[in-house]
Image (cartoon, rainbow, N blue to C red):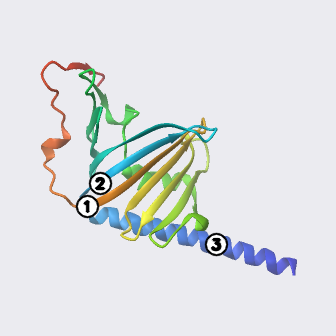
Amino acid sequence: MKTIIVLFFLFAQFLYAQSANEILKKAQEKFNSISSFSAAFSQVIVNPQGKSTGRDNGTFIYKRKNKFIVEQKRSTIVSNGESVWNYDKTNKKVIISPFYDDPTSFSLERFIFDYPALCKIKFVKEESNDNEKVILLTPKDDQLDVKEIKIWINNSNLISKLEIVDLLDLRFSFRFTDIKENPEISESRFTFYPPKGTKIIDLR
């Protein structure tokens, strides 16, 4: 009897892993099939004690090859895939950094294509619903500076939410709503041109 139970458990684990990989594969195929998307987003940061330490929202525009625009009330962040402009509207200051050295860089390609290869992948059944499926990525070693990543995939196979837990147990959640596929976006929008009088700090 114990042998049957163990075999059933192992088979169930195999099915969950297979399901998670299938969900991820569909998300990867979907991502490869579109050139861009736009969405409204909300961000929540929760400390290890479970208390919210920050909330924000705004609009998010993304184009393949790590080009993005994050528009918020107090800031604008723009990336052309090589440089990132982080503009502080209140203090009229912009910091320009190389893409891969900038802490505000937000690469969906990493979450969909790069990180899964470095992680164990699991389908989180108890948190799924009719409109979204959830997969959990747990790093296999210390190559990533995170404890876990959860990815919510909607019925269109697009990412609708990301949740990252860092090494200090801070939880960062990003929820995308009103997602529009392939909006027309001029390439010039992915280069930031500071307003007159802006203090420029160029770290490239």
Say above or below: 159 vs 169. below
User: Given the image, on which type of amino acid does mark 1 rest?
Assistant: Lys
Q: In the rendered structure, which disc, 2 or 3, sits on the residue that comes first in sequence?
A: 3
- Secondary structure at badge 2 equals strand
* Contact (Cβ within 8 Å) of mark 3 with mark 1: no
Q: Residue at x 53, y 61 (%)?
A: 135
Q: What is the quadrant of residue 142 in the picture?
A: top right
Q: What is the quadrant of residue 136 in the picture?
A: bottom right
Q: In the rendered structure, which disc, 1 or 2, sits on the residue that comes first in sequence?
A: 2
Q: In the rendered structure, which disc, 3 or 1, sits on the residue that comes first in sequence?
A: 3
22 or 49: which is nearer to us?
49
Q: Which residue is mark 3?
A: 14
Q: Nearer the viewer, mark 3 or mark 1?
A: 1
* Contact (Cβ within 8 Å) of mark 1 with mark 2: yes
How far apart marks 3 and 1 lie (CA) works out to 35 Å
Q: Nearer the viewer, mark 2 or mark 3?
A: 2
Q: Residue at x 40, y 59 (%)?
A: 159
- Secondary structure at badge 3 equals helix
Image mark for residue 180: 1
Image mark for residue 39: 2
Q: What is the quadrant of residue 88 in the picture?
A: top left
- Secondary structure at badge 1 equals strand
User: Given the image, on which type of amino acid does mark 3 rest?
Assistant: Phe
How far apart marks 1 and 2 lie (CA) works out to 6 Å
User: Given the image, on which type of amino acid does mark 2 rest?
Assistant: Ala
How far apart marks 2 and 3 lie (CA) works out to 35 Å
Q: Residue at x 79, y 74 (%)?
A: 6
Callout 3 environment at 10 Å: few (<14), some (14 to 19), or many (20+)?
few
Callout 1 environment at 10 Å: few (<14), some (14 to 19), or many (20+)?
few
